[in-house]
């Protein structure tokens, strides 16, 4: 009886954090082109944290590639959000707007925040339900049942979105968007996409992380790695492209994200994160 083949992901390594935005642009541009050619619309889900700052390289990357991003056809949704107003510094939407969407010509009505009229004590369940029915499900309809690209960060505890280690939400199988009121990171009340979306309804999932604090996560998530030749990646001085085996069982929520079918999984990290975090296959 043959054993199941390990799940494989592609890893792009930037020599420094300052150039990681260039590498992050490559899979986003590919996903965008494919979506626009197929459906004349591009749906992309984004996390907050430091991630939006890395997206500032996108406009120049499109220009350098000679590709029209057609910003007016982009639809930007939140991979997760804190139950706070968009004016709050904890808001992922605020960060995404300030660092990315307000700097390009994506229509403001195509950047989808939570329904702030629902905010209040014990509001998170209603906020999550509204986001699922009024944002995620309609966007899935225009993108033929799958989000074109999901761009995520990951924490030093291995969480992603608002999916935290050992939390009951990791077992959610029916809701596309769920609420959480006991987040181990403040603020405690949030909404998040769930694994059914990330693993079954996403064409591209791209993780991005920088710094030596990410090394232990990568070391536990990845098995053997083999260097690949990629012209785009090699155009960034000192960058590398790898294919890696994902370790089983998945040690963290971020490692549980494994798009099924033809879905693609890509991790984009800098040299400090990769230095102690990736073991190359010497055979």
Image: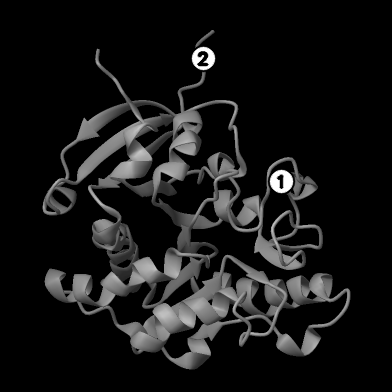
Mark 2, other Cα within 10 Å: few <14 / some 14–19 / many ≥20: few
| Residue drawn at 72 percent across, 87 percent down | 116
In percent of width and height, residue 95 lies at 50, 77
Task: Work out which quarter of the rendered image holds the N terminus and state it.
Answer: top right
Which of disc 2 and disc 1 is earlier in sequence? 2
User: Label 1 neighbourhood size at 10 Å, few (<14), some (14-19), many (20+)?
Assistant: some
Report whether residue 140 is seen.
yes
Q: Relative to 213, is 55 above or below?
A: below
| Residue 59 x, y percent position in the rendering | 25, 77
For mark 2, what is the residue? 3
Residue under label 1: 170
Task: In this rendered view, identify the residue nearer to me: 261 or 82.
Answer: 82
Q: Secondary structure at mark 2?
A: loop
Query: Which x, y percent locates residue 98?
Result: 44, 83
Residue 128 placement (x, y as % from top left)? 74, 71
Residue at 79%, 46% in the rendered image? 168
Give 138 or 250, whichever is nearer the viewer: 250
Q: Is residue 26 visible?
A: no
Counting every numbered tag in the picture gives 2
Image-based side of 37 in relation to 6, left or right = left
Give 263 or 16, whichever is nearer the viewer: 16
Q: Name the front one of labels 1 and 2.
A: 1
* Marking on residue 89: none
Which of 233/30 is in front? 233
Dot 1: element: helix
């Amino acid at each position: 009886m043959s054993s199941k083949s390990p799940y494989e992901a592609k890893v792009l390594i930037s020599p420094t954090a300052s150039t990681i935005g260039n590498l992050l642009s490559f899979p986003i541009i590919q996903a965008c082109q494919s979506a626009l050619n197929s459906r004349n619309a591009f749906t992309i889900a984004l996390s907050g944290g430091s991630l939006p700052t890395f997206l500032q390289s996108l406009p120049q990357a499109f220009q350098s590639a000679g590709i029209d991003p057609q910003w007016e056809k982009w639809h930007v949704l939140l991979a997760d959000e804190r139950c706070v107003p968009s004016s709050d510094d904890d808001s992922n939407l605020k960060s995404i707007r300030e660092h990315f969407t307000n700097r390009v010509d994506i229509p403001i009505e195509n950047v989808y925040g939570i329904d702030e009229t629902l905010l209040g004590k014990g509001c998170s369940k209603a906020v999550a339900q509204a986001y699922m029915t009024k944002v995620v499900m309609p966007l899935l309809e225009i993108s033929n049942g799958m989000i074109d690209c999901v761009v995520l960060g990951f924490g030093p505890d291995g969480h992603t979105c608002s999916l935290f280690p050992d939390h009951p939400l990791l077992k959610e199988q029916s809701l596309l968007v769920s609420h959480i009121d006991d987040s181990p990171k403040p603020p405690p009340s949030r909404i998040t996409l769930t694994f059914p979306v990330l693993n079954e309804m996403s064409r591209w999932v791209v993780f991005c992380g920088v710094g030596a604090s990410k090394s232990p996560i990568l070391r536990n998530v990845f098995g053997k790695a083999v260097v690949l030749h990629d012209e785009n990646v090699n155009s960034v001085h000192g960058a590398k492209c790898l294919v890696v085996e994902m370790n089983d069982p998945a040690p963290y929520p971020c490692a549980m994200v494994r798009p099924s079918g033809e879905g693609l999984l890509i991790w984009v990290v800098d040299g400090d994160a990769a230095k102690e975090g990736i073991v190359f296959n010497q055979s």
